[in-house]
Image: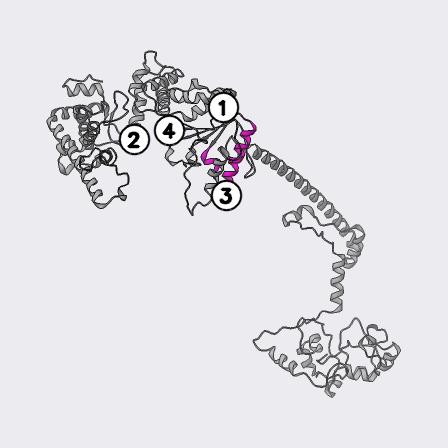
Amino acid sequence: TTSNCFLVFPSFSCPGNLPEMFGSFQNQIYFNDPRTKLLSYRDVINGDVCASVQAVLNLRELGLSDLGTQQVVKSVLPWLSPQEMSRPLCVQTVWRTSHLSTHSFFHNKYGENLSSSLGVMPMSASVFSKQHSSPLLSVCTELQYWSVFIQSRGFKTLRTKTRRLNSAFNRQVESEGITPSFMKGFLTRDKGVEAENIDGLLKDKNIPIGQQESFKRGFAEGFLKAQTLTQRSQDSVRRTRLILLVLLVVGLYGISKTPFISVRFRTTSGLDSAVDPVQMKNVTFEHVKGVEEAKNELQEVVEFLKNPQKFTALGGKLPKGVLLIGPPGTGKTLLARAVAGEADVPFYYASGSEFDEMFVGVGASRIRNLFREAKSNAPCVIFIDELDSVGGKRIESPMHPYSRQTINQLLAEMDGFKPNEGVIIIGATNFPEALDNALIRPGRFDMQVTVPKPDVKGRTEILKWYLKKIKVDPAIDASIIARGTVGFSGADLENLVNQAALKAAVDEKDMVTLKELEFAKDKILMGPERRSAEIDKKNKQITAFHESGHAIVAYYTKDAMPINKATIMPRGPSLGHVSMLPENDRWSETRAQLLAQMDVSMGGRVAEEIIFGQENITTGASSDFDSATKIAKMMVTRFGMCEKLGVMTYKDLTAQSPETQAAVEHEVRVLLKDSYDRATALLKSHAKEHKNLAEALLMYETLDAKEIQLVLEGKTLETR
């Protein structure tokens, strides 16, 4: 090596001739094994060596077999001063291990403190090292005391390597498979010490002979207890695994039975969703009331589904789609169900919003699955409710670059390259303006059926149908109720009958009477009563005169709608309300009728100003002004009822010139001012009637049309 190396021997206690010893034992260096005293140079020369020694190092392995004995001793042992030669042997020294290399093996073995105390100076051996120390060694020796980072080399002896190899050989080899950490405790367990190793364990631990039997007994008891605990833990693990397996199977079964979207789509895998048809045998056209024209149109579709050869024999093409258009609650969905029930064919139902989800391509995939299933069960009916959700107009939008895939797939399925035989598509929407033009063209939706709100005849039929399902007073005439429910849809009439039945049940009555039906109608028209609201006398008085102003203007204006009921009972968001219903169905409205509606709206604010003064008007007329302004704008911009602007329409005022916008605003303002003036003149001319009606409202809170007429005629009302 490049550094000085020294061999240090333990001291020998027995005399002997060291040179002869080296020669007699085949050039081997010997150590005395139990003691750790340093062998001094004087002892080596004098031959104070024990005869019973044990060889630990072969000179041939060190390359020293060709050297003489004296040369080996002088070159290997450290040089000692004459003072040290006469110094007595030192006491027994504890051997210690150094983990970081220093500049010599001697310092690694005994440390710098021991060498300095003995005065041992390292001697350069010509056999092992160079005569002069390396400059790099000096620099590294000095750098170890500086605040710098130096890589140090550690020593690993042959004994350490052998121990590591033996331990690796005896250690159990783990499987090459990757086992999760949370399962290692379940899959592995420590093996106990085998019985034949107990004697060796007693010998290694130096346990006295008298205590060995107790040790064996305790070891056996502990081993048996550990086996019992291990068996219990294994049983617990087995039970836990069984429970988890059962829960997993039950969960997978539940997921397989749970619908992915609704009862129509059965799926547990994202895109490929199958569809279940629904049989509608219990729904026919007898269940549909008030829309006779729509039923007649759809009767052709039923005939096609029952007997398609009747139409194809003459060379006619069968319709592919029927589009139902109408306001909410008019029975579009019920008509589609009735078509499937009359024809007795499978009925596939889906909502337009079910085709769009967070993943791209899901909508188009579900359209394909829906039509694939329908074609396999043709003839059948596919009903898509809220068609505008999936069939809206296609636009170029960076926010939704893939939104057109679903409608494109729908267009291709309805009238694409492949024929679509035996499948009727019925779509329903209350917003037909939003549909794409390619979707509503002939060849896809060949028929467009309008489903309007029922007229008085239709309302009478609907009321009779629902009144038969409850216990009702036989004296009730459905036609009278129908005349008082102008503008009600079929859903509104069903709700009216249901609310009346609930009211009768709350009042503990045996049947539904006209009183409960009137209560339900007022609840729908004016909102539910808020009897718990506490209103002070001043605000109640203002509300009474405000609502009386509306009623007076409506009663004395020729073209205004008849009054149905007036109340100052808080209902919904308002403190009072005056409901008006036309005597007959109105299919159109005249200019005089529109102006009369504006005058009635102005009556509330005019009454407040006349009775309480300009400084005490309230915010209660905000909704009245909204309705009056809306009517005035429609008269000017849409109905052509303005002499100055003519019969031209202005749908988008922002696209008009500033002059046109100013002219429109001026005409609207003129109409509103004239209406306000007419209401003021009418209320001033009927101030007495106005006061009497307000006092009656303060006393009775709610007045119907007949009671209002009696008050305005100056007659006294009966005490309730």
Residue 143 location (% of width, % of height): 60, 78
Q: Mark 2 near mark 3, Cβ–Cβ under 8 Å?
A: no
Furthest toward the left, the residue is 685
Q: Amino acid at mark 1?
A: Gly
CA gap, disc 3 and disc 4: 31 Å
Q: Amino acid at mark 3?
A: Val
Q: Secondary structure at mark 3?
A: loop
State left or right for residue 652 relative to residue 376: left
Q: Nearer the viewer, residue 385 or 261?
A: 385
Left or right placement of residue 95 versus residue 432 in this view: right
Few, some or many residues within 10 Å of mark 3 (<14, 14–19, 20+): some
Circle 4 sits on which residue? 328
Disc ID at residue 544: none
Instruction: Give the percent coordinates (x, y) of residue 33.
Output: 80, 71
Label 1 or label 3, whichever comes before in sequence order? 1
Residue 107 seen in render: yes
Q: Which residue is mark 3?
A: 360
